[in-house]
Image (cartoon, rainbow, N blue to C red):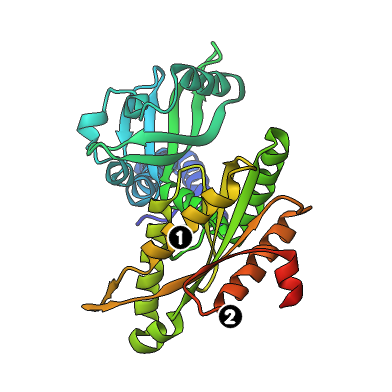
Amino acid sequence: MVRPPRAHQYKVIAGIAGLAVLCGLIWPGWARVLLCILGITVIVYMLGYDRIEAQRKSDHAVSIFDRIFEHSRNGVAVLDAQGLVQRINPAYMRMTGYTEAELRGTRLRDLNSGRQAAEFYEDIWKAVREHGHWEGKIWNRRKDGSLYLESVALKGLDPLASGAYANYMVLASDATERHLDREYLGYLALHDALTGLPNRLQFSDRIEQAMARARRTSNALAVLFIDLDGFKQVNDTYGHAGGDAVLKVVAARLKHDLRDTDTVARLSGDEFTVILEGLDHSESDAFVGQIADMLLTSLSQPIEVDGHHVSVSASIGVSLSAGATSPEEVLDRADQAMYRAKARGKNQVCFYSARAEAAA
């Protein structure tokens, strides 16, 4: 690589050239001619070197940009004044599944997933015209038809007198995984990871809303507290994997046997709760009793674990909302009734009774 001369080197060369020209004017004959030619040659070299060096630096900068463009982990696209694709880098090809030839001359909005209206894209270009850039996220569609969330930065390059731009640059990355991770974390905050049922936090919110609706509609609601009988033996015999398999089946049976308007939640371990809403006060006891008996029968059916059929039963405590002043009180009453069902021999249903609990 040719290195540019330093400042003192320029001075030396300029001094030599000047001396050669001066000597050429003073010395007689052929020496004058040779020295003048030497001085002029050096001066021309210096002027030409500057131009060559400037071009070399420009070419080197372009080469660096091309390498960055090619090896960037983010997708890069260059658009013309009309927003048509001129170049895309390999990362953009990998992200979209399209080749540069397939996208050249098209608009990136052609990758639209259909989740954004035409006005969305109009707002993007309006922001670029007014501010020179836009950043945000767009749901796009890959060549194979799958959707992905693209994080986009669009910037205008080479401004024109009209206020538009001669070119635009798009920096893009696939934000789908980050988006799904955030969604999943939000899901886990309200759901049990094993069964997918609402967890204790979401159950607390559901029962509070249910009690508010019951007050508005003058209906009753019931809370069932379900604790599995014999679950510890399953864990001891088949390990936690076997226990988890049983819990998944129990959760699926509870969801299948109840209405869509009912809430099934897993509080912890082998403890489940159910909220039954929209009950008529005069018929609530009989209706809830039928539901609880049906659940006992369903949960007592054998479950296959590692090729073996295992059986568990359930003790169910029931609490009606009548007379309760808070969600915590309703749940606590159902919990007490469940323990009374356990004490009576398990695999049965007990309704909360203030008199019975006091006697116990």
Say whether residue 40 is left or right of residue 19: left
Instruction: Give residue 192's position: percent from left, percent from top.
Output: 50, 62
Residue position for label 1: 293
Type of amino acid at the residue the image marks with label 1: Asp
| Quadrant the N terminus occupies | bottom left
Residue depicted at 74% across the width and 60% down the height: 329
Closer to the camera, 49 or 151?
A: 151
Type of amino acid at the residue the image marks with label 2: Ala
Residue position for label 2: 343
Q: Is residue 283 above or below residue 310?
A: above
What is the number of callouts on the image? Answer: 2
Instruction: Point out the tag, 2 or 1, that comes first from the N-terminus.
Output: 1
Say whether residue 206 is left or right of residue 36: right
Say whether residue 37 is left or right of residue 11: left
Residue depicted at 42% across the width and 53% down the height: 255
Direction top: furthest residue: 162
Direction right: furthest residue: 325
Q: Is residue 58 visible?
A: no
Residue depicted at 37% across the width and 34% down the height: 140
Instruction: Give residue 66's position: percent from left, percent from top.
Output: 34, 44
Specify the quadrant of the image occupied by residue 110.
top left
| Quadrant the C terminus occupies | bottom right
